[in-house]
């Protein structure tokens, strides 16, 4: 993997957007560069940007999310990091970005974005955070921790491995090399073996704990069950009979109580009727008065109308004189307006022909202008097309010259490298044989190491076998002690159950809890029933009130309907008077020509009363009609309101009735549920006190449940001890099995070690022969391509070189073919462009000539129009003339309407005066007639005069209230009498039915019922216990049959896991983990020593033989003296740390080629000589194709490394980057 470019924005002190190109020749030529700058300037931030782009985190900040971001530059609204890198899978671009809301510094942090894309095609591979992380691991071969151990050795963690304690080195090795899986495997094998062993023991214990009934016990239980069922049937019949008797007695008591209550209500009703005698008299007088109320109200309205019409006649006579003067002035205004209209129309007629001629010239000018513009646009478009065609022609010629040059270069390459044509067919075969040779070489090395280890193991295996036999004896004694303790506890549990299975006791607990729940529900039913009965009583009272209100509205509506009929007659009379007044008013114009003594031309009469007398006032007639209609409308609206009220009350009565039915049904359902609960639980007690009955039953049931729970608790505590001891026993068995298998394994190892040594020797010899033959074949195949030296390290380079030479040869062939085809196509297109340019030149010349002709024609028409009308607009001038004519007409029409209105007003008032006078005479005659009739009518009903009549009148509400009260008393008397008779009849029938039941003897019906229920419950419990025992015995028999087959299958499964546990299993995973970590640690030391020898020949690293994963140092300058790493100086520690870090990097990247390496350390502890050595080693990595980057502020680094990236501090905590290949993006 190689880092190509880095781009980032607003990270720590490096504000703004920066890009660093690590492919710049300054970096690639030297192979090593330094990142320098003062402390805190932002050197490490460059490496943070690489980690952030790849993994979304940095060595210093593990958590960057929507809630926290400590790396974004202060006072900025976004940050990003992007890395372009190359791996064996291709070239990729990884991008990470996060911003605040609106990209404002004060905005809320948003969720970060992370994506990976193909750098060549630009195709986005994934934008989901988890998928990106997985894809990065796939294409790089490293996760974050492996990356920071192989490519980027972060600040503060450089010497972590050297300074760590031995116990802390194990997690580091697991983390960077993946050997932690061995620990997991060892633990999982141990856990799985224990589970399988526990499963087998559990199956055996379950089968051994099952006890069965004998045949004699089963037969006796069956006979006993049959006898008890027969007895239960007889008891149930007796309970049914006694329950019916008790229900009948309760009904008789309830009926007797109801009869007594009805008699008390009848006595109270008699007293109330006596107290209501005065109200009855008032009601009689009011009912007689209400018969004449409508006539009285009509007479009052007629008297009021007489007064109104007299006053109205006086007002109209005053207005008539004023209107006559206004009429004269309006007639003069009409004559003046008519003369002005005639003058405006004459001016408009004179200008109309000139305006028409100007419009025709304007139309010709517009047509000529459009023609000129169209011709000009056509010429411009052809010029533009000629320019485009000419540009395309130049571009095509340039492209053809470039293709000719490319073709020449490709032809030259094929001529110089003609031998590479063989690689097209042979490259894949050679690569396969190189891989096979490399694999055989590695296999031979592994076999050699294995053979050397095998020669050292026989004595160790024999010692392990003797130790295993001693451990087996101690384990057997411990297992026997725990088995005896477990037997004692099981006996104690059997005594606690008192012979009953724990399942039966737990079932009884469930039954008791269910019984308590039923009793709770019965208490809730009682509470709900009481509430529903109270609601039903409220609804009954409301129903009576609604019926009363409905009758009152119906009575008031009937009175209003009579009043409405009378008012309609009055409106009709007023309409006749008004029409007569209109006729008198309309004859006013002709009436002025009548003379006394001469006949009227219409009727022939010589007497003309309205010509000299007062004309009826039509306004008063109209106001009287309006008033009468308004009163009629009010009456109709009031009737409608009563209709709406009656409909609303009717709806409420219906809803009330439905709610009463619903509540009655609920009460019935609740009583049914109560009865079912009583029958289900067999409750016996006083039916009048149902709450106490349920409460007592619940307390008794809870007391029994407490005793059962106490028994279950004692058993559970004992069972818990048994289970704990069983776990200890099983653990001891596991240990015993483990030591047995260890003994067997040691014995097997002794016999198999010699056979393994012989096998390894044979395999080693065969591998050497195969490797030699394959090497000779490869040398012959590679000779034509000037490759003779083959080593394991050079296989990858040879494969890559051959593939590259083959690909370059094929690409040049393809370039030549493509260039030939493209040149032929370009020649045709160049010829087409030349023809197009010639055609366009001819068309442009013709277009310019036509354009000049159209321009001359337009000028002639424009001059003619200016001579006739100047620059004025005909439309505007015509609108001004029309507006003047229209304004004069509007003035004339307005004056005419005013004059007509004044004449009409005068005629109207004269007619109104005449009409009102006639109407007033008729009203006065009607008042006298109705007064006489009304007085005679009330005398006939017992009233002396109008005053006594008015005193007896009652309001509608009072009259209705008295009627409702009297009617209510009568209905209540009828209802009570019927209800009393009904209850007495039901009581008689119930007493007759009760006489038919036999006397139960000395016991009452209640005591006999309770005794029978108790006996029934006892029999039911006994039968249930027998059924449970029989069913439990059968279930146990089926269970034993199934357990035996399961035990055999479990034994076979356990044997497989115990064999695997003997080899690698342990509770802490140490057995397999230690073996794997020892191999890893040895490889690390070998890798580190290779790098350490390049820096100094004084020290060698080796594993501490007395402590696993501990390091020791061999000082070759002190006769091979062994030293602790803690005694090394600062510079020596740095060199050892660097060698270990490079070794770890090599181990992590053994499956991934690492071509970029970054070290974030100060090198400040090294003297000049040691610094030169360290830098020389790092520079030597360039020979392996690596690019090394070092972060340091040590001055000597700047002197020794010429390629540098400098981070310079600026003001306000910001920094800038100065380096070749680096730029700031605006």
Image (spheres, rainbow, N blue to C red):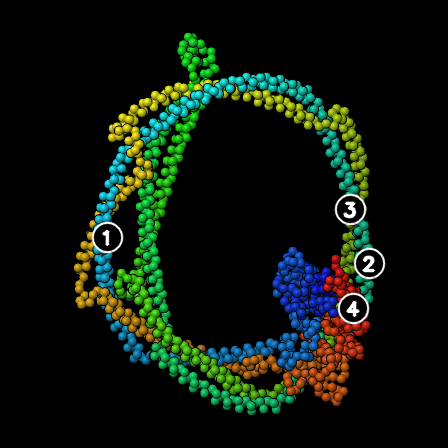
Spatial CA span between label 2 and label 1 = 128 Å
Q: Which residue is mark 4?
A: 1204
Spatial CA span between label 4 and label 1 = 115 Å
Question: What residue do we see at 69% from left, 85% from top?
Answer: 1124
Q: Position of residue 1214 (x, y in %)?
A: 73, 63
Q: Is residue 66 above or below residue 552?
A: below
Please tell me which of labels 2 and 4 falls first in the chain: 2
Q: Which residue is mark 3?
A: 388
- Numbered tag placed on residue 261 in the rendering: 1
- Numbered tag placed on residue 48 in the rendering: none
Foreground of the two, 846 or 640? 640
Tag 3's secondary structure? helix
Q: Is residue 121 above or below residue 662?
A: below
Please tell me which of labels 4 and 3 falls first in the chain: 3
Question: What residue do we see at 57% from left, 22% from top?
Answer: 894
Residue 125 visible in the shown view: no
Q: Position of residue 397 (x, y in %)?
A: 81, 52
- Numbered tag placed on residue 405 in the rendering: 2
Residue mark closest to the camera, 2 vs 4:
4
Q: Position of residue 644 (x, y in %)?
A: 38, 39
Foreground of the two, 1031 or 623? 623
Question: What residue do we see at 65% from left, 56% from top?
Answer: 102
Question: What residue do we see at 41% from left, 78% from top?
Answer: 717
| Quadrant of the drawing holding the C terminus | bottom right
Residue count near mark 4 (Cα–Cα under 10 Å), binned few <14, some 14–19, many ≥20: many
Residue mark closest to the camera, 2 vs 1:
1
Please tell me which of labels 4 and 1 falls first in the chain: 1
């Amino acid at each position: 993997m190689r880092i190509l470019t880095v781009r980032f924005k607003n990270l720590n002190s490096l504000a703004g957007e920066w890009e660093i190109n690590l492919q710049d020749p300054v970096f690639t030529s030297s192979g090593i560069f330094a990142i320098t700058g003062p402390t805190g300037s932002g050197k490490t931030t460059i490496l943070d940007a690489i980690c952030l782009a790849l993994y979304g985190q940095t060595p210093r900040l593990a958590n960057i999310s929507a809630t926290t971001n400590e790396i974004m530059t202060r006072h900025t609204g976004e940050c990003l990091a992007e890395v372009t890198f190359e791996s064996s899978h291709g070239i990729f671009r990884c991008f990470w970005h996060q911003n605040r809301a609106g990209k404002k510094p004060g905005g809320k942090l948003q969720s970060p974005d992370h994506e990976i894309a193909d750098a060549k095609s630009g195709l986005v591979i994934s934008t989901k955070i988890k998928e990106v992380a997985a894809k990065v691991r796939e294409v790089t071969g490293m996760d974050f921790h492996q990356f920071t151990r192989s490519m980027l050795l972060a600040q503060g963690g450089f010497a972590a491995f050297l300074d760590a304690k031995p116990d802390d080195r194990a997690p580091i090795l697991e983390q960077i090399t993946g050997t932690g899986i061995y620990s997991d495997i060892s633990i999982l094998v141990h856990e799985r073996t224990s589970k399988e062993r526990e499963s087998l023991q559990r199956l055996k214990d379950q089968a051994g704990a099952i006890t069965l009934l004998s045949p004699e016990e089963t037969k006796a239980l069956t006979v006993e069950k049959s006898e008890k069922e027969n007895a239960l049937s007889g008891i149930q019949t007796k309970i049914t009979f006694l329950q019916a008797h008790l229900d009948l007695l309760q009904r008789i008591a309830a009926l007797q109580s109801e009869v007594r209550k009805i008699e008390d209500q009848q006595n109270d009703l008699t007293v109330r009727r006596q107290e209501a005698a005065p109200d009855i008299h008032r009601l009689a007088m009011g009912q007689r008065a209400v018969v004449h109320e409508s006539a009285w109200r009509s007479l009052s309205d007629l008297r009021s109308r007489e007064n109104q019409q007299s006053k109205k006649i006086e007002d109209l006579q005053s207005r008539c004189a004023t209107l006559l003067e206004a009429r004269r002035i309006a007639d003069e205004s009409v004559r003046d307006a008519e003369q002005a209209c005639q003058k405006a129309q004459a001016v408009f007629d004179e200008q109309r022909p000139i305006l028409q001629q100007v419009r025709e010239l304007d139309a010709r000018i517009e047509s000529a202008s459009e023609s000129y513009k169209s011709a000009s646009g056509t010429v411009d478009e052809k010029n533009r097309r000629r320019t485009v065609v000419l540009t395309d022609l130049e571009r095509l010629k340039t492209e053809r010259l470039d293709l000719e040059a490319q073709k020449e270069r490709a032809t030259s390459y094929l001529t110089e490298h003609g031998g590479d044509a063989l690689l097209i067919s042979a490259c894949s075969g050679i690569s396969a044989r190189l891989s096979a040779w490399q694999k055989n070489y590695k296999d031979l090395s592994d076999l050699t190491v294995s053979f050397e280890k095998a020669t050292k193991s026989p004595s160790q295996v024999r010692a392990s076998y003797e130790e295993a036999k001693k451990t087996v004896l101690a384990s057997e004694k411990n297992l026997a002690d725990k088995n005896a303790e477990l037997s004692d506890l099981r006996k104690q549990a059997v005594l606690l159950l008192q012979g009953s299975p724990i399942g039966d006791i737990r079932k009884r607990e469930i039954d008791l809890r269910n019984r308590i729940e039923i009793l709770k529900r019965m208490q809730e039913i009682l509470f709900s029933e009481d509430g529903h009965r109270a609601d039903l009583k409220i609804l009954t009272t409301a129903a009576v009130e609604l019926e009363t209100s409905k009758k009152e509205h119906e009575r008031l509506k009937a009175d209003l309907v009579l009043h409405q009929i009378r008012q309609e007659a009055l409106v009709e009379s007023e309409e006749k008077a008004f029409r007569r007044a209109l006729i008198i008013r309309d004859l006013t114009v002709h009436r002025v020509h009548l003379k006394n003594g001469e006949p009227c031309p219409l009727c022939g009469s010589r007497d003309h009363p309205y010509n000299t007398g007062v004309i009826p006032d039509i306004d008063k007639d109209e106001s009287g009609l309006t008033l009468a209609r308004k009163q009629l409308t009010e009456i109709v609206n009031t009737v409608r309101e009563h209709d709406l009220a009656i409909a609303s009350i009717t709806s409420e009565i219906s809803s009330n009735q439905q709610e009463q039915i619903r509540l009655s049904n609920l009460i019935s359902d609740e009583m049914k549920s109560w009865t079912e609960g009583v029958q289900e639980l067999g409750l016996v007690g006083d039916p009048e006190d149902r709450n106490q009955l349920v409460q007592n039953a619940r307390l008794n049931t809870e007391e029994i449940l407490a005793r059962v729970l106490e028994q279950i608790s004692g058993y559970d505590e004992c069972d818990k001890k048994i289970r704990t001891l069983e776990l200890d026993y099983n653990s001891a068995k596991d240990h015993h099995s483990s030591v047995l298998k260890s003994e067997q394994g040691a014995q097997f190892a002794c016999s198999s070690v010699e056979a393994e040594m012989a096998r390894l020797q044979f395999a080693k010899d065969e591998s050497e022969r195969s490797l030699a033959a394959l090497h000779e074949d490869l040398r012959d195949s590679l000779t034509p391509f000037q490759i003779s030296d083959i080593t394991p390290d050079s296989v990858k380079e040879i494969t890559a070189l051959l593939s590259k030479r083959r690909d370059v040869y094929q690409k040049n062939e393809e370039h030549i073919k493509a260039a030939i085809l493209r040149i032929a196509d370009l020649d045709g297109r160049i010829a087409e462009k030349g023809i197009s340019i010639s055609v366009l030149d001819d068309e442009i010349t013709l277009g310019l000539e036509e354009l000049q002709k159209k321009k001359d024609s337009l000028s002639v028409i424009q001059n003619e129009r200016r001579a006739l009308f100047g620059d004025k607009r005909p439309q505007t001038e015509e609108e001004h003339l029309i507006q003047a004519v229209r304004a004069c007409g509007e003035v004339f029409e307005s004056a005419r309407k005013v004059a007509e209105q004044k004449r009409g007003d005068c005629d109207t008032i004269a007619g109104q005066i005449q009409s009102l006078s006639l109407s007033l005479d008729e009203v006065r005659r009607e008042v006298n007639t109705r007064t006489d009739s009304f007085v005679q009518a009330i005398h006939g009903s017992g009233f002396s005069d109008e005053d006594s009549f008015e005193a007896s009148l009652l309001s509608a509400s009072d009259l209705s209230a008295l009627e409702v009260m009297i009617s209510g008393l009568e209905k209540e008397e009828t209802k009570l009498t019927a209800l009393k008779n009904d209850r007495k009849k039901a009581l008689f029938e119930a007493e007759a039915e009760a006489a038919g039941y036999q006397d139960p003897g000395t016991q009452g019906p209640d005591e006999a019922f309770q005794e029978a229920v108790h006996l029934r419950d006892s029999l039911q419990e006994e039968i249930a216990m027998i059924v449970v025992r029989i069913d439990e015995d059968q279930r146990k028999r089926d269970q034993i049959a199934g357990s035996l087959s399961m035990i055999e299958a479990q034994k076979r499964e356990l044997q497989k896991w115990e064999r695997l546990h003997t080899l690698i299993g342990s509770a802490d995973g140490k057995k397999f983990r230690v073996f794997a970590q020892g191999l890893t640690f040895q490889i690390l030391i070998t890798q580190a020593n290779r790098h350490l020898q390049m820096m100094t020949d004084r020290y060698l690293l080796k594993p501490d033989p007395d402590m696993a994963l501990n390091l020791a140092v061999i000082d070759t300058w002190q006769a091979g003296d062994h030293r602790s790493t803690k005694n090394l100086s600062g510079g020596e520690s740095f060199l050892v740390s660097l060698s270990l870090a490079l070794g770890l990097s090599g181990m992590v990247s053994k499956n991934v080629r690492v071509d970029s390496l970054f070290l974030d350390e100060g090198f400040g502890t090294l003297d000049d000589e040691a610094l030169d050595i360290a830098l020389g080693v790092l520079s030597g990595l360039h020979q392996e194709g690596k690019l090394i980057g070092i972060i340091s502020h040590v001055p000597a680094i700047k002197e020794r490394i010429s390629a540098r990236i400098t981070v310079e501090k600026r003001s306000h905590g910001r920094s800038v980057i100065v380096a070749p290949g680096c730029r700031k993006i605006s």
